[in-house]
Image (tube, rainbow, N blue to C red):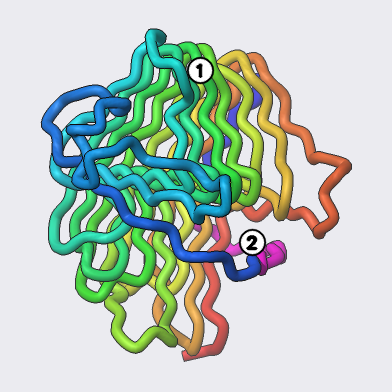
Amino acid sequence: MFRSSFEARPLLLAVALLGVSGVASAAPINWTGATGDWFDPTNWDLNRVPEPIGGGGAGDSATINNGGTATASPSATADVIARDIFVAAGDGTGAVAGALESDGVRVEGQFRLDVGAASGAITGANGTVTVSGANVFAGQVVAVGTVVTPEAAATAQGSLTVTDGGVTGLASLNIGQVSINTFAPVFSRDANATGNAVVDGDVVGGLNVGTNTNGSATSTAEGSLRVIDGDLETRSFGISVGTSSAGLGLDTGSANGSVVLENGTVSISPASAFSVALTAGSARSTLPR
């Protein structure tokens, strides 16, 4: 068994940044049902099921922000798939909530799967995704309990539970993350993020668990990942756990992250074309105060 738990202490290793080319804008489609079938068109505001990228179309950004729960069962004839899947995330205002429950049906956000993510005008996010007997995949990012450059003080909570299946975020898995762009026209550094992920299977992707970048001195980022009977394979840029940093001499917020592997191994993919690093328990400010 490999077990690691980190709290913020002075230690720094470099982590590379990802550049992504521009793509066509996705069409927004919003869940309007209470608890109901993902594949029932009447549960969506456009009266159709979200569509993936393909056939010349840019695909849909499927959003569950109304406190409802979308479900998918083995009787489904297709995967739960869209360009983006936002559960208590994406476009919205104020407090949002939502849930996605899949029993034996694969869940794929071709670009992103965000669960409990506050950004922009969303100041409170509470999202849950539960998948049994199937895999979860995102072509870029799986984000669970994150606050990214909100316009006002924000809080986010996210939970991802996968039983008898794995999770892949080809670029990264961000769990319990605060990330503030201080060059944005409007932003708040007051942010609190909590993310928890439990996966009974393999986990693949760059990993950020409990990371706080440019949050205020009172901001918090709490993240935990538990992998049961599966391996953790790092692709892209590596693993950051319990790290806090701020630029321009700003105070750093707090960060606490833990990664637990039960009956599994950690490996670095030889196919990665980028530098790979492990950053554990770091706290730094770019310039002295």
Mark 1 nearby-residue class (10 Å; few <14, some 14–19, many ≥20): many
Is 16 contained in the magenta span?
yes
Magenta segment includes 267? no
Q: Position of residue 161 (x, y in %)?
A: 40, 25
Read off the residue under disc 2: 11
Q: Which residue is mark 1?
A: 134
Give me the residue at 49% from left, 42% from top: 52
Q: Amino acid at mark 1?
A: Ala
Q: Is residue 259 above or below residue 175?
A: above
Query: How many numbered marks appear?
Result: 2
| Foreground pick, 207 / 63 | 63
Q: Can see residue 6?
A: no
Q: Earlier in the sequence, mark 2 or mark 1?
A: 2
Q: Quadrant of the N terminus?
A: top right
What segment is highlighted magenta in the picture? 7-19
| Image position of 77 with respect to 235: above or below | above
Q: Secondary structure at mark 2?
A: loop
Spot occupied by residue 194 in the image (x, y as percentages of width and height)? 33, 47
Please tell me the numbered disc located at residue 246. Answer: none
Which residue sits at x=39%, y=32%? 160
Tell me the amino acid under the disc marked 2.
Leu
Does 132 sit left or right of 64 as displayed?
right
Task: Determine the image quadrant of residue 190.
Answer: bottom left
